[in-house]
Amino acid sequence: MSDKILFVDDDENILDTYKRLFRKKFNVDTAKNADEALDIVEKKGPYIVIISDFRMPDMDGIQFFYYLKEIAPKSVRIMLTGFADKDTAVRAVSEGKIFRFLVKPCKPEVVEDAINSAIKYYNAIPEELDSKTIDVYQPDVIEENKSKKIDIIAEVRKSLKKDDIILPALPDMQFKFKRLIEMGSDVQIIVDLLKQDVSISSKLISLSNSSFYRGLKENKTLDKAIQRLGLTITRNCVESIGNRSLYIHSNKKYMEFMKQLWEHSISSAYAAQLISEQISYKLKNDAFTLGLFHDIGKLVLVQVISELEKKGKFKEEIKIEDILETIKLHHCEFGAVVLRKWEYVENFVKVCLYHEDLHKGLQELSGYSVNELHVVHLANNLVKRVGYGESDPLAEDLEYLESAQYLQLNRLIIEKIKEMLVEKMKEDKEYLV
């Protein structure tokens, strides 16, 4: 009777049934919703097994388990779901670290068997594991890979500290343009600045004549191009064109990665912009720019590691797989560093820092930044699902992501955004991609 089990369901009749069936076999507690369950876990935990219904008001089972990972990382999680939700539940395993899901209606012996399996699993979990390694514990592999990654990132940090390597600067035109926008400068002053860059001017004029923006007459001047596009679209284009040069790499080893990274970044920018147009929440920073820069740390690390290789700072050749894994692990941190160097506001920096760790970001951010973090988180995952730059075929259904639910975007709206994104990428590929 020492095995503590918590059942969570908004139907009190079902909870009473669980109590009656299992009170003689387990130490059973119940909660009528996710908020009450989190409170019970904090006050009466730890629980060996926590079983939650998927469909609940305010916070569903996936969201509940997501938060549960932080306060009860060792508790084994089982989700009950209706048949219609089965595919979604399977894809949601990684998000909520769900041990098993059961399809309702579920026989008592099936539930009991799942609980017993979960108890055995709980008792097999080493004490030192946290919620991030609980499902993939392979000590030898982890330690071997960890040492390689630390060598790479340690050399990067050491070189930056000694100024052996200089972080990339924001392109000069983009820096000046950013300052004029922040100062609220007159449109004519902005036009005069952009006229100094033939490449940007010609692409803005070409874009203003595309089928999406085209007027009755062909446009041949930058002034009219900006009038036609508007200041927001102009700003997005300048940032895109200015940043594109940063993603060109002469080393064949990185060419394909940089190509994919640029495609992911520009499509994330469009996705963030489209998402922002579909929500009622206000954003303080520009959604397009937030999306464009969310993975800038990957660019920085490629440039720094490549430069260190040229200078012979590594004792032996490093496999591209190890480099990419290091970039994946540390890009948020280095992205925040370079955005501070480029003088972006701190809330902008923190959205970049936490876009891969939504829960931690929500602990650090407040106000408009919370909205911006959710927009970027959803945009990043949506683009992966569509397959721009990097695909993520195993990702869960997007409408069940916490960011989608926070922004109140359902399946139909998300599908609409995906369609508009694909159309937008096709439309602007000639000019920006």
Image: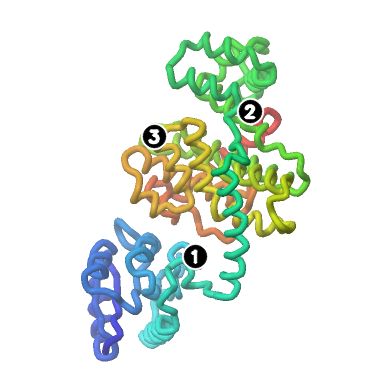
Name above or below for residue 240 compared with residue 191: below
Q: Nearer the viewer, residue 82 or 76?
A: 76
Q: Quadrant of the C terminus?
A: top right
Residue indicated by mark 1: 94
Q: Nearer the viewer, mark 3 or mark 2?
A: 2
Disc 2 crowd, CA 10 A, few/some/many (<14, 14-19, 20+): some
| Horizontal side of residue 132 vs 192, given as left or right | left
Secondary structure at badge 2 equals helix
Residue 160: quarter of image: top right
Give me the residue at 71% from left, 37% from top.
248
Earlier-in-chain disc, 3 versus 1: 1
State how the image is colored.
Answer: rainbow
Q: Quadrant of the N terminus?
A: bottom left
Q: Amino acid at mark 2?
A: Ile
Examine the rendered structure and indicate whether residue 132 appears above or below residue 258.
below
Q: Amino acid at mark 3?
A: Leu
Name the residue that disc number 3 marks.
283
